[in-house]
Amino acid sequence: MFDKFFFFTRKIAQALGSKTPYTQDQMDKFSEDLKNTFNNNLDKALENNPPIIKDIKKKVITLPIIHNYIPINTYSRCGQKKLATRSIVLHYTGSPGSSAESVQYYFSGLARQVNTKIGTTYASSQLTVGLDGEIIQLMPLDEVAYHTGGYLPPVPANTPAYLTYTDKITSYILSYGNPNYSSIGIEMCINSDWKLTEKTITSTAYLTAYLCQIYRLTPESDLYRHGDITYKECPKPWFDDTSLWVSFQKQVQQYYEEFNFAVAS
């Protein structure tokens, strides 16, 4: 970018050369002095303010996020604003082979439910990541999604385990009441063999690192599996083999430290 700037500076100098009292050599020297001054000032800025400006030297990862919002409705997108963003909760679809588009279709379809004696389903997330790593945003990130709710004590009798908070839950998470009011949910698609693809994991790690940066979250302490919040083995592959969860956290930490992120939507 800066080379282009100085290229155009020289072009202007050449254009003005015949109309000014300066020779072409003088104009070229002016352009070169300007470039040197800029570089010297940049070096000083990097030296004096490393915590702030060092990010200029990081690689930039562009996330192609597709916006395909769920319509406002009672069961999957209430439209209510969250109170804060204090954590990121990772989920899996539990539907082998389903695409990110089918996740959006399912959440949107919940709006057409008819209240019956067997009850209705409330479910959604802010984001979903597909089998090829595609990312779909399902609602604004500052809105409430129904992805990790449960009953606050005292828990009603016969409450399903997946709606009961675990002993891992902290007052920090519950400080805004229901965690849906202070978290972002990411729904990951799984392959037909019930495993997460490498593309899904990598894309989710980039996305999570990006969210940690913009919301000033710490990958080591502010990431949760759904099953860390309520008694539900979700994402199941990361409960069947907890080393995969540890590996994912380390991957997010690495991306968080090494990259800056941009969004192409």
Image (cartoon, grey):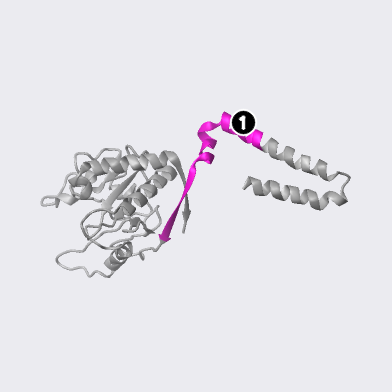
Q: In which quarter of the image is residue 46?
A: top right
Residue kind at label 1, given as amino acid type: Lys
Q: Mark 1 points at which residue?
A: 44
Can you give x and y, in whole percent of width and height, for residue 93 in the image?
Answer: 25, 57
State whether residue 70 is above or below residue 220: below
Residue placed at 39% from the left, 45% from the top?
209
**Which of the pair 154/77 is nearer the observer?**
77
Q: Quadrant of residue 137?
A: bottom left
Can you give x and y, in whole percent of width and height, for residue 131 in the image?
Answer: 31, 58
State whether residue 228 is above or below residue 141: above
Tell whether 31 sits left or right of 185: right
Q: Is residue 173 on the magenta stretch? A: no
Residue placed at 33% from the left, 37% from the top?
220
**Which of the pair 63/220 is nearer the observer?**
63
Can you see residue 191?
Answer: yes
Q: Give the range drawn in magenta.
A: 39-66
| Label 1 crowd bin: few (<14), some (14–19), many (20+), radius 10 Å | few
